[in-house]
Image (spheres, rainbow, N blue to C red):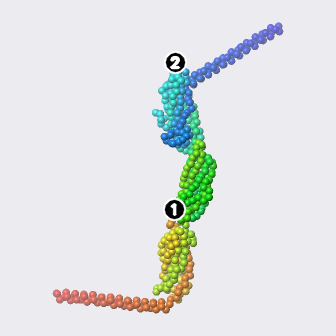
């Protein structure tokens, strides 16, 4: 009994193992069939990775596979029919770009290339062209390629589809602007510190950035001429402070200093660019530049003549100079126009005033106001106060006045006499003419 039971149990176990093995074999066979079916349905079309170059006719570059913003890019894609015995017809290859790419017209339909057929094992290449947006930042951007074809079997036709997404690297380009942080005006022969801001206005980062400055015949650099910035990312800025000097004798005007920027781009290429920085050398009129002094005081017949000299002690011109003299002891103001004074020039304002202190002379306080313009037509004004010693009128001056008075009376009498004589002559001529007319009648 015991032996029979053991034998029966072994038969049952063998039966179970046989069933499990059958299930496993069935599953393996099903998986193989599905795999073969999948391979049979997808292996007919193969697509290689895209090959691309920058359009050389548009941009001269030594690295045609490096794409920058603004480039036109030619893309070639190899399509292969890897089926062993089936032909593919009506093959359409569609390129679907996203930002920053824009498809350009190179095929009859923008973004779609067609192949009439591919025999088994045959390959062909389709061509596309895309434009990269000028403002695209650095990064890898996708393009999607979809292929549709008809495969001809013995008994039926089937549609074959394949889609892949590839990523193209875009390397942004650094572009720079420089500006002055504040208005910069340099006086002749002056050394002045100025601050410059370097802006990266491009789409790419600049590595190992350095800036070198060189002066000109009118404006030069004092101290260091090269400044190392390092990394300057897109949209970032950095400030630099340099010392500039205006060469003595430089005329007013705008003069450049040249800046050379050198850096490594994100594409690993060395770049450099030059740009001028314009500085203004401006005329400056200093407060102590105009110098005013009493030149002469003299007695004249009608009163007194006061002369004040104005000297230009600077290199800048004093234009349209006007002197105005006032005094609490004088009844009115006196104005004298001097005009323009160049460097080291001087001229005088002359004022004639009437009798002062009844001819007894004395101290006359006067205020002298001088106005003038610089070459930029900005007006300046200074006031100088003087106490002028007015000399007393001498006896000769008094006698001269008497003589002049008598002479004036004599002249008036003579003029009156000549006038009356002429009137009598005209009257006599008129009467003679009337008598002659009466005799004729």
* Image quarter of residue 421: bottom left
Residue 269 seen: yes
Work out whether residue 437 or residue 86 is closer to the camera in this orientation and state it: 86
Q: Which residue is mark 2?
A: 154
Q: Is residue 319 above or below residue 163?
A: below
Q: Residue at x 53, y 37 (%)?
A: 53
- Name the residue rendered at 51%, 21% in the picture: 152
* Contact flag, marks 2 and 1 (Cβ < 8 Å): no
For the residue carrying disc 2, how many other residues have a C-alpha within 10 Å: few (<14), some (14-19), or many (20+)? few
Indicate whether 79 appears above or below 231.
above
Q: Is residue 150 visible?
A: no
- The residue depicted at 61 percent of the width and 51 percent of the height is 210
Spot occupied by residue 307 in the image (x, y as percentages of width and height) = 50, 80
- Residue 112, position in %: x, y? 50, 32
Q: Secondary structure at mark 1?
A: strand
Tag 2's secondary structure? loop
Residue located farthest toward the left when viewing the structure as drawn: 441
- Residue 1 location (% of width, % of height): 82, 7
Residue where numbered disc 1 is placed = 253
Q: Which mark is residue 153?
A: none
Q: Measured along the vertical axis of the image, is residue 158 above or below residue 310?
A: above
- Lower sequence index among marks 2 and 1: 2
* Picture quarter with the C terminus: bottom left
Q: Position of residue 120 (x, y in %)?
A: 52, 22
């Amino acid at each position: 009994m015991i032996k029979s039971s053991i034998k029966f149990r072994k038969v049952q176990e063998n039966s179970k193992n046989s069933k499990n093995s059958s299930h496993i074999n069935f599953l393996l066979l099903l998986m193989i069939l599905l795999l073969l079916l999948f391979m049979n349905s997808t292996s007919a079309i193969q697509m290689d990775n895209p090959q691309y170059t920058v359009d050389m006719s548009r941009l001269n570059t030594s690295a045609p596979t490096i794409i920058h913003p603004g480039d036109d890019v030619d893309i070639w894609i190899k399509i292969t029919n890897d089926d062993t015995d089936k032909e593919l017809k009506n093959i359409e290859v569609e390129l679907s770009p996203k930002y920053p790419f824009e498809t350009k017209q190179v095929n009859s339909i923008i973004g779609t290339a067609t192949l009439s057929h591919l025999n088994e094992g045959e390959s062909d290449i389709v061509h596309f062209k895309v434009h990269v947006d000028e403002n695209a930042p650095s990064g890898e951007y996708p393009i999607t390629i979809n292929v549709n074809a008809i495969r001809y079997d013995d008994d039926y036709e089937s549609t074959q589809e394949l889609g892949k997404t590839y990523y193209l690297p875009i390397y942004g380009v650094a572009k720079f602007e420089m500006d002055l942080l504040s208005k910069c005006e340099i006086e002749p022969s002056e050394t002045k510190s100025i601050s410059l801001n370097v802006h990266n206005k491009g789409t790419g980062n600049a590595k190992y950035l350095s800036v070198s400055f060189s002066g000109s015949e009118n404006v030069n650099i004092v101290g260091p001429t090269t400044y190392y910035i390092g990394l300057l990312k897109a949209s970032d800025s950095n400030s630099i402070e340099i010392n500039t000097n205006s060469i003595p004798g430089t005329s007013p005007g705008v003069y450049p200093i040249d800046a050379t920027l050198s850096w490594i781009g994100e594409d690993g290429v060395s770049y450099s660019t030059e740009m001028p920085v314009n500085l203004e050398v401006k005329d400056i009129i200093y407060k102590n530049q105009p110098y005013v002094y009493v030149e002469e005081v003299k007695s004249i017949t009608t009163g007194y003549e006061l002369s004040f000299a104005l000297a230009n002690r600077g290199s800048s011109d004093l234009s349209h100079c006007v002197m105005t003299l006032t005094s609490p002891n004088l009844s009115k103001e006196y104005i004298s126009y001097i005009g323009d004074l160049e460097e080291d020039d001087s001229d005088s304002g002359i004022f004639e005033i009437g009798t002062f202190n009844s001819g007894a002379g004395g101290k006359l306080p006067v205020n002298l106001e001088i106005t003038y313009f610089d070459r930029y037509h900005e007006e300046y004004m200074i006031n100088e106060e003087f106490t002028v010693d007015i000399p007393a009128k001498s006896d000769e001056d008094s006698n001269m006045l008497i003589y002049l008075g008598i002479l004036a009376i004599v002249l008036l009498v003579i003029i009156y006499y000549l006038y009356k004589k002429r009137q009598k002559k005209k009257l006599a001529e008129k009467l003679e003419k009337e008598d002659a007319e009466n005799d004729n009648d």
